[in-house]
Amino acid sequence: MPLNYPHDAIAHLPSRMSIVDANILWVGTWKPNSSYYLLPYSNAVKSTDGGQTWQFYSVPVTGSPCISDVEALDVNTCYYLYLDVAGAGGGQIWKTSDGGATWSRKTTTQFLEGWPNFIHAFSQDTIIAVGDPTSGYFEVQISNDGGNTWTRVPQSNIPQLILTMEAGQSGKNFGTIGSTIWFGTSRGRCFKSVDYGNHWTVSVINSDTVTFGWWNVSFSDILHGIAYRSNFQPPLYYLTSDGGTTWTQIQILPGLVYPNISRVPGINGGFVIAANATSGSMPTSVFFTNNFFTTLTKIDSGLHSYNNYIYFKDATTGWLSGAYGNDSTILKFTDVLTSIPDKKAVSENLEIIPNPSNQYALITFPPEFLGRKKIMRIIDVSGKLVTEYELKTDDTSININTSGYSNGVYTIEIISDHGLIKSNRWIIYH
């Protein structure tokens, strides 16, 4: 479907997207010239009817802005993160709270030297923005008041660089689950924080930490994720089942190049991957896995997508960047992805005592989970993830204080690293 950009450039590319729901999508646009060099462009683009119509909003960014990432909270609230294409660094964060009518700059001294890479909202108040290294370490800025003020994470909380030119990747090529966040670097490493970005560890994805390449990461849960290098051919793919501590190389889609991957929230082990044929930049094929890349199913092919930027919100809501040209298209997913794959049966129930719970609840795990890496999720009646716990292999139970939960019905679910899953209904009544 067209976005109806003005024909004042060789192309307008909807490269950065943030999906609110099936109807609301915010888009960040690249404007290249005939040499593929990105020209300044700052307009925000939004649809509130599933792509039938589009609204354009002027963001008063100074300098030579190019979109790096977009993070939407709802139909009215959205952050646009810009880098400056005129130099070797510099960037700004702008926010709208009235649907795009007005914008305010939320950064002052932040990202003045290095390019900003991505922005993520853990909540309405807690925002993280990550940029390339300045002063010898990655610039991680955190706001706890909706972007009004920012604090840079100190160097002591971030692992040091191993080489010069180690940088991050722009756009939504990072992973987030609850309070945990991961991002890949140009030297084949993965940075991870479990506390909203305040403290970081790092692991090696690929032993070749010298070759410069764009490493992207995506996670289905706090244990299972994929890292891939997309700009070198052939692409490289690595899986982790321990939250990014160790990585194992696998083969995916031999013969296809320039992949981009999005997890599918709501489907455990669900990812979509868009990739091109080796004969050229197009056509693009899209594949889906519901079992953490054990199998892949082609869901579409022969598409015209430049760079294969793909984004999914759930099993029915997904978008793909369109072709390189003045048609300025964007592609919308119009099907339903298959449900969660079958899991191995667990002989005993997940025990919750007492249930209903008033002050505390003791959750006891079935014996099949002993000795396994596992996570536990608490989900409210609407299907929203409320809390997620990363459990130890020898944990057999966990005691939860219910004071932080409202009265109502919840689901407690435990998932192991080899496919075991069990859940039980939990009632809280204070």
Image (cartoon, helix red, strand yellow):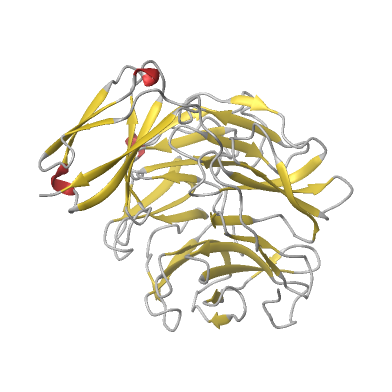
Task: Please identify the residue farthest to the right as the structure is shown.
Answer: 279
Residue name at image x 43 percent, y 74 percent: 75
**Is residue 269 shown above or below 29?**
above
Q: Nearer the viewer, residue 141 or 146?
A: 146
Residue 83 at least partly seen: no
Spot occupied by residue 138 in the image (x, y as percentages of width and height):
45, 43
Report whether 29 appears left or right of 103. Answer: right
Which sits in the foreground, 144 or 269? 269
Residue 164, how many percent across, how many down? 56, 36
Residue 120 occupies quadrant: bottom left
Image quadrant of residue 171?
A: bottom right
Q: In which quadrant will I find the N terminus?
A: bottom right
Please give the count of numbered marks on the rendered protein. 0
Q: Residue at x 25, y 50 (%)?
A: 409
Q: Is residue 234 among what the camera can see?
A: yes
Image position, residue 204 (x, y; %): 54, 27
User: Residue 261, image x and y in percent?
Assistant: 63, 46
Q: Is residue 70 left or right of residue 207?
A: left
Residue in the foreground of this view, choosing between 229 and 139: 229
Q: Residue at x 83, y 38 (%)?
A: 255
Q: Residue furthest front?
A: 347
Image height check: is 333 above or below 6? above
**Up-down relation of residue 229 to residue 33 (above or below):** above
